[in-house]
Image (cartoon, coloured by chain):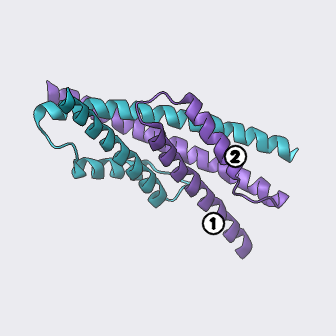
Chain colours: A purple, B cyan
Amino acid sequence: MSNQKLEDLRLQVDDLNLEILKLINERAEVVQEIGKIKEKQGVNRYDPLRERHMLNLLKENHEGPLPFKTVEHIFKEIFKTALELQENDQRKALLV
Amino acid sequence: MSNQKLEDLRLQVDDLNLEILKLINERAEVVQEIGKIKEKQGVNRYDPLRERHMLNLLKENHEGPLPFKTVEHIFKEIFKTALELQENDQRKALLV
């Protein structure tokens, strides 16, 4: 009985993982678009105020059960990798 | 024109952030349930084989644009925090 329940819950986690995977890649695509526009405008890609705004919005909408500092940590990781992706795009652009 | 486009893209990122926030909290709830069952069964919560299975599934379904090693890094962070949450639950259980 418990093992069936465990198996069901694990399938739920697998589904949630795949949904999260899809969304972080979708997010990366949008951030790449933003990077291209900023590039054309000659604006710096890293914008601490924008990052603060995003974290505030997350905090306002956060209901748990994860502690918010954990959420913040995960998102800072997501922000950082998106920025790295923009930098790679720019480097590629410089090579062509 | 470009500024309007930038604003639209940022709103898209905000929406995606909130969806990701919702899913990582939902995931944490399910993982808490799993923790309770394992607790009753007296099974160790940390299961490297299960973690490997989840990463393999993510890899099979990953289409980019993020490099997979980045995805792996973000998910290891998510796995770690979920585990910490289970540990907190257990500590609380020991105190009552």
Q: Nearer the viewer, residue B63 or B70?
A: B70
Q: Residue furthest left?
A: B42
At horizontal 60% and vertical 50% (from top left) the residue drawn is A28
Residue drawn at x 72%, y 55% is A35
* Residue tagged 1: A88
- The crowd level at tag 2 (other Cα within 10 Å; few <14, some 14-19, many 20+) is few
Horizontal placement of B73 versus A62: left or right?
A: left
The image quadrant that residue A84 belongs to is bottom right
Determine whether, in the image, residue B43 is placed left or right of residue B90: left
> Looking at this view, is B34 or A93 the one in front?
B34
* Residue sticking out furthest to the front: B95
Mark 2 or mark 1, which is nearer the start of the sequence? 2
Judge whether residue B38 can be spotted in this image.
yes
Q: Amino acid at mark 1?
A: Asn
**Spatial separation of the CA atoms under disc 1 and disc 2:** 21 Å
Kindly identify which chain the residue marked by label 1 belongs to.
A
Q: Chain of mark 2?
A: A
Residue closest to the eye, B60 or B90: B90
Front disc: 1 or 2: 2
